[in-house]
Structures are given as structure tokens and as C-alpha cells.
Amino acid sequence: MISYKSKTLDNLAVVEAAEKALDKTCITAEEFQQIKTAYPVDLYTPNIYMRFGLFILTLVVVFFSFGLFCLIFMGGGETAIAGLTLFFGACLYGAVEYMVNEKKHYKSGVDAALMWMSGGAVTGAVFVLADTHVSLSGMSLLFLILSMLFVLRFADVSMSIVAYLAFLTLSFSLLIYSGRMVIPFMLMGVSLGTYLLSRKLTAIHACRHYASCLKMIQILSLITLYLAGNYFVVREASNEMFDLYLKPGESIPGAWIFWIFTIIIPPIYIFAGIRKKDSILIRTGLFLVAAIVFTIRTYHSVAPIEVAMTLGGVILIALAYGVTKLLMPSRNGFTSEQTDDDKTDAIQLEAVIIAQSFNQQAPQGDQFNFGGGTGSGGGASGSY
Amino acid sequence: MDIHLFEKLQQEGLISPDSTEKVRVLSRNKLFSLHWELKTILYLGVLLLSGGLGILIYKNIDTIGHQAILAMIALVCAGCFFYCFKQKLPFSWNRVAAPNGFFDYVLLLGCLTFLTFITYLQIQYNVFGTRYGAATFFPMLVLLFSAYYFDHLGILSMAITNFAAWLGLTVTPMRLLSANDFASQRIIYTGIFVGLLLVFVAYMGDRLDRKKHFAFTYSNFGVHVFMIACLAGLMGGGLGSSYEPDNSYMLWFLLLAGATAFFYTQALKKRSFYFLLIVALYGYVGVSYVVVRLLVAANSIEAFYAGLLYFIGSGIGAVIFLMNTSRKLKKA
């Protein structure tokens, strides 16, 4: 199924594990070299920044190649162009296979760019051929088939996102006729089923090369499980789709069920995550706590925003302080200390985030004065 | 770490029993870390608290209650700085670790409340008069001092954005392009100046061994601001036309080319994939602009085809270039 040689990927996993052990000084450098020779990996995986750059540049190349293609075959009418696009998409797929099998690209950015453009070309061509009369279920089915092809062949994480969302849309488009009250529950069921399935698959040896895709699907299915039962989502979505014309303050039937889901699911995630020591559950749960706050504040203004922010800030700081003190130095296998060693990059990223969130904008108009000097040409009036 | 894997490696004679034992001890005592979760919660807490206090005082500025709020802000600020001065490890020009997990966030809260306090004083009492520059300059000094004295990269980047704002430039990462009017010559020259200065500070800090680890933050802001200002200068004249040849853009192109070459060698020297990539991309954009401009001046259908071929060829060339350079960097 997978386009890469299974043996090579296994070797890669061994070398990565050995690299970690080397970082922790469990094994010596000579031992690491021995392992590397015994488990050869001939894949090309560039640094993350290079991957980004290669992705962008490949997109540029493919875009302009397509433009040239179209120019040459211009004048053939809509169908000809669509057929050409379909052919182009197939060529791109061939290009991915070539890059993977011959050039040994593995998560290089080039492969992802070619995949996205290939999928885009095929769906675009189908759209034009069908004269844009594609039903929601047909469209999502097409997306699902294409993205599943890429996931199975190349284990691409971004394509697994598309595949899951297409799958969910497909389920939704099939369920929409089963009655409006059951849709949220059905979608929750589908999400839960996907989550449990992906957890099962993760444990199966044959699926080991898809571990990161399955991880992504776990995160997504946990989120959609929550969103399908979230009061805000259910109320606003049914209001839009079934023309309920709800006025502010009015509610949907059975609102209390969704309020319970809204409030109870994230704590369940966190609790289950702590019990199972599963960081996916913990992080998703923490992230969704923000969704609880947002949902409640949308319908019930408990306090003015600034008071809520101040109090919330104090509570969060106190919470972090309390948990850290509790875990000092460690308790029940938990610690607040850092265990992974990717420190420098994370700190640089944090600095960028701080600069972003507390932004300093240049003063505008007459507020501006060049270093306290005069006549800087800043504005039309005021403090020249 | 998977102990079974290392047991297998030992059987194959690749690692010694000693090493396997080390892995076994480590994987048995493996702790589940909540480090980043707690840091994020703490960060959000600081963000909300400082933001909330800021809005609180802004909304109550005409009521009697605002003095109480002001006193509270001053108290929080003073408390934070007091804590930092008491807890900090001795100053050094090298990297100084934070004494505990909270130190960085207490300092951040202190600096943010300080900014709120200064803004309030300016609005209410006009302390800096009409010299608005001083109202940005003074906090910048405090931020810069805190960044160096307590060794905090986040505060340093706040100081840098503050410094640029004082000169009339917004360098907040996601707003660099949207918040500045790059059609204005003054903004472009300010950008060139700020960029050069920041890169220079990074270079000197690295050379004189003064807070070497700040160099990345300085040059990150510096290179982006400089290159964007350069590209803005280059593209200021639009795509030009075949009727009025105006070759002043060539000067900008020379500047860009020189800067690209310089930053490129620096990136190779520092073995930074990140800088290598951004410099290569900025350089590529600049070259492509000049090529497109020349082709537009030629004004023919052949030129159009040549443009398409240029992008295909140069794109492939750039991909190969990046792949080779990154191989070189990895091996070096």
C-alpha cells in the first residue's frame, strides 16, 4: 500500500530512537554510528524550514507549468481544458511517485506540494466537466477518495486532515435527511467511532507507518466530537440550515442536552488524558476549555469583559502556580519540568508570539514625532 | 523510548549491555511532562490579566474608582519587579537561566503593567507633554534594560517592536506588511535603517560575546525589515512601462543583491537553515521582479512565454539550490 519501502521506514524509526538515546547520553557516539550503518536510511528529509521553502517553490513551478500547458492547448474549449487539467493532475501524481520512489523524498515539501496540486487539478477538472453541478455528497466523496489515496500511498498528514473532514462532510450529507434532531448525535457518534478506531489502528503493527496520520485524526475527531454537541454550534447551525429564525435569547429544543455536552466534554477529555497519560486528550481538552468560555459568554454575560479577563487571568495564573507546586518535583509520574530537549526553537517561537500579542504599532498622524525632534513630516497638524 | 528495540539492538551486537541498562533505567523512570501545558496556561493568564487591567482602567478613566485601579496596577507592577530583583540569578553577559518556571512570566506581567501605567500617565496627566516620542522612548529603555538584566527574549522582542514604533515603523510579525505604508519613501528608508541597525547589533553582540543568544532575535527582526524595505523600494515604481524607461530600481536591486549575498554567507557561517531559506526567498522575489519588469518592457508575446519558462526554470533551479545547500549545511 505505502509507496515507501517498509524496511526503510522501519530503519528510520530505529535511527530516530537511537538519536534520542544519543541525546540523553544513553548510548555512545560510536554505537550510534554502528546503528546507522546497520540500519541504512536513504530517504531525503530536509530541515523543517527547507521543507517550507521547497513547498512554496514547487507550487510556483507547478503553477507556471500549468499556465504554459494551457497556453499551448488554448482554444480547445471548456471540455478540452478540463480534460487537460485531469491529465495534468495525473501527471502530477506520477511526479509524486517518481520523487518518492526514485529521488527518495520523504516529507521534503516537494511531495506535499505535488500532492496538493494533483488533487486540486483533478477536483477542478471534475468540477468543470460536471458543469459545477456536484452534490455535497458527491463532492465530499471525491475529496475522500483522492485524499485517502494520498494518505495510503504517502502517509501525508495534511492529506489525512482533508480525508477526515471529507469523511465527516460525507456522513453529514447522508444524515441530513434523517431528521434534524438526530444529526448532532449522529455526528458525535461518527466522531467517537473514528476516534476509537484510530486508537485501535495505532496499536496495530501493520499501521505503524501511519502513526502521525492517525494521531492527527485522533485530535480532529476529538474536536469534532465536541463541536457536534456544542450548544453554540448546534444552535447557530440549525438556525442557518433549517430557517428557524431564532431571536436572541430564544433557544433550540432540547437545549439543556447540548449545554451539558458543552460543559462536560472538555473536563472528561482532560480527566481521561490524565488517567491514561495521553497528551492528545489533555491538550485537546485544555484547548476546548476556551470553547466552553466562549460559548457561555456568547449567551450569558456573567461579567463585563474586562472584569472577566482580569479574574480569568488571576485564576489561570493561580491554577498554573498550584499545579506546578503540586508536581514539585514530580508526583504520580507527572512533572512540570521539561523532558524533551527542543528548547531553543520553542523559546525563539515564544519570543515571536510575545512580540505578536503585545504589539507596538507605530503612532499615526499627529501622534508621531521623530524621536522627539521636529518637522519629521509625520502628520498634517498638531505637534510638528 | 522503546526498551524492546534497544534489547534487540544489543542482541545484534550494536550497543553494549551498559547502554541498554541506561535506556532501561531512563524508560522506567520516564515522567509525563506537563511543562508546555502549564507554560501556556501561565502565558494566557498573564495575557488576560494585563489586558483586563488595561481595559479596566481605560473604561473607568473618568470615575473615582480609577485611582484604586491605578494603585492596583502600580502595586502589581512593583510587586513583579520586586520579585524579579529578589529572585534573579547574578547578571552575566552570557545566557542566564531563569531561577524558576514563574520568573519569566512574572517579569512579563511586570513589564506589561508598567506599559499600561505609562500610557495611563501620559493620557491623564500628559507627563511627557506633547513629546510623544518620549512616551515610547522611555518604556523602550525600561524594556531593553529588563531584557538584558533579567535575560528575557520575549521582553527583548517587545523592546525591538517598541524601538521601531518610536521611529514610526510597525514591526509586529504578522502586521509588518499590513500596518506600514510602504508607498512612503520615509517608511522605506526607516525600514532600511532599522534593519541595518538590528543586524549590526546582532553581529556586534555575537562578536563581543555580549548576550550571544540574543543575536537570533535581533537578526530575525532585522533581516525581515531590511529585506522587505528593500523590496518595497525596488517595486515602488510598479512594473514600469516600455515608454518611460526608469532605471533607478536597479540601485535598489544592487542593494538587495549585496544584502542577499552578505546574509547568505552569514547564514552559512552560522549554519542556520532558517536564515538561509528566508534570504533565498527574498532574493528570489527580487530577481523575479527584475526579470518580469524587463520582460514587460519588451512587450511581446514571446516575452510572455519567456516569463512562464523563466518561472518554471528558475523555480526548479531554486529547489535544486536549496536542496544542495541544505545537504551542504547538514554535512558541514
Image (cartoon, coloured by chain):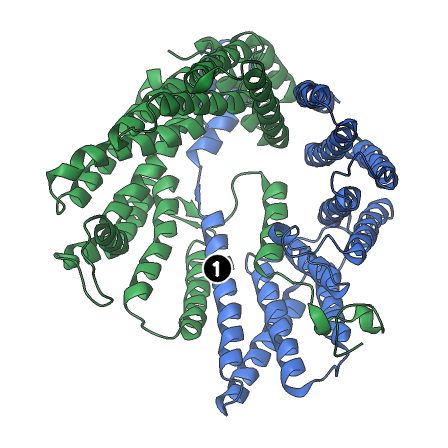
As drawn, the residue found furthest toward the bottom would be B64
Report whether residue A81 is seen: no
The residue at the point 28 percent across, 35 percent down is: A169
Q: What shade has chain A been given? A: green
Vertical arrangement, residue B18 with respect to residue A315, above or below: above
Label 1 belongs to which residue?
A: B44
Where does the image place residue A198, in percent across and percent down from the top left?
29, 29
Closest to the observer, A328 or B84: B84
Question: In the rendered image, which quarter is residue B207 located in?
Answer: top right
In x, y percent, where is residue A363? 69, 67
Using the image as rendered, state which of residue A363 and residue B248 is in the foreground.
B248
Chain represented in blue: B
Horizontal relation, residue B99 to residue A259: left or right: right
Q: Amino acid at mark 1?
A: Leu
Q: Residue at x 39, y 75 (%)?
A: A304
Res. A255 image quadrant: bottom left
| Residue A73 x %, y % | 54, 14
Q: Nearer the viewer, residue B104 or B4?
A: B104
Q: Quadrant of the N terminus of chain A?
A: top left
Chain assignment, label 1: B
Residue A293 in the figure: left or right of residue A251: right
